[in-house]
Each structure stands twice: as C-alpha cells, then as structure tokens.
Image (cartoon, grey):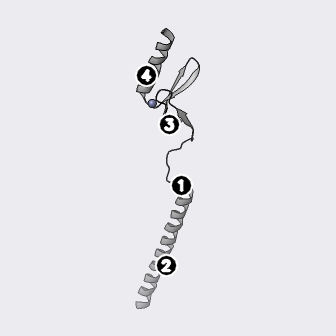
Amino acid sequence: MLRGLFRLILYAFVAYIIYLLFRFFQALKKVSKSPGHQTRRLSGIMVKDESCNTYLPKEDAIREVIEGKEYFFCSKECRQKFLEEGKRKKSG
Ligand SMILES: [Zn+2]
C-alpha cells in the first residue's frame, strides 16, 4: 500500500515536471514571437513641420494637402498658423 502511494507521488512529480517543461517552452515561443518591446509599428519616416520647423514621425503628424502639395504639422495650431500665413502671402 505504501509502494502504491509512493508511485502516485512519483507520477504526480513527473507530471509536474512535464508541466514545468511545457510552460518553459511556451515562454520561449512567446519570446521568439514577439517583435520586441516596441508595440507601435513606426515606418521610421520623419516629416518636417513647415510652421515651427520641427521634425516628427509621420504617424504623429497632421497631414494637409495645399495646392497639390503635402504638408505635415505637429499640431492643429501649427496647421492653422501655416494656413493663415499662406493666405496672408497670397493677399499681400
Ligand atoms: Zn509645429
């Protein structure tokens, strides 16, 4: 009867080891699958804000097409400023 109990413990122990190995390999899979700490995908393209002359990632920029040309701005304020300056240049 004691041997039976010992066997049961042994089986449980082996099952536990298999479980640990399984988890270990799953963790390895996860690490190899993930592209890294960076979750956001960036194209790496930097664009210039014509209003305040700063460079920012294209993904963060506000895009505006003026007379067929593409312009990028860091904020709505810069966009507004640029549009107003353009109008002023035209009129004056
Ligand atoms: Zn700006």
Sequence-wise first label, 3 or 4: 3
Cα–Cα span, label 4 and label 1: 42 Å
Mark 2 vs 4: CB contact within 8 A: no
Residue 1 appears in the figure: no
Residue behind label 3 places its C-beta within 8 angstroms of ligand 1: yes
Q: Residue extending furthest front?
A: 92
Q: Amino acid at mark 1?
A: Ser
Q: Residues within 10 Å of mark 2 (few under 14, many from 20)?
A: few
Cα–Cα span, label 2 and label 1: 30 Å
Q: Which amino acid, by three-letter code, is at mark 2?
A: Val
Label 3 or label 1, whichever comes before in sequence order = 1
- Give me the disc on residue 14: 2
Q: How many neighbours does mark 4 have within 10 angstroms: few (below 14), some (14-19), or many (20 or more)?
A: some
* Front-lying residue, 69 or 13: 69
In three-dimensional space, the C-alpha distance between marks 2 and 4, rounded to whole angstroms, equals 71 Å
Amino acid on which disc 3 is placed: Leu
Q: CA distance from mark 3 to mark 1?
A: 26 Å
Q: Nearer the viewer, mark 2 or mark 4?
A: 4
Q: Earlier in the sequence, mark 2 or mark 1?
A: 2
**SS at circle 2:** helix
User: Tag 3: Cα neighbours inside 10 Å, few (<14), some, or many (≥20)?
Assistant: some
What residue appears at the point 54 percent right and 34 percent down from the top-left corner? 47
Dot 2 or dot 4: first in sequence order is 2
- Res 32 visible: yes
Q: Which tag is nearer the camera, tag 4 or tag 1?
A: 4
The residue indicated by pointer 3 is 56
Q: Which residue is mark 4?
A: 81
Residue to which mark 1 is pinned: 34
Name the residue nearer the viewer: 92 or 13: 92
Identify the secondary structure beneath mark 3: strand
Picture coordinates of residue 24, whole percent (x, y): 51, 68
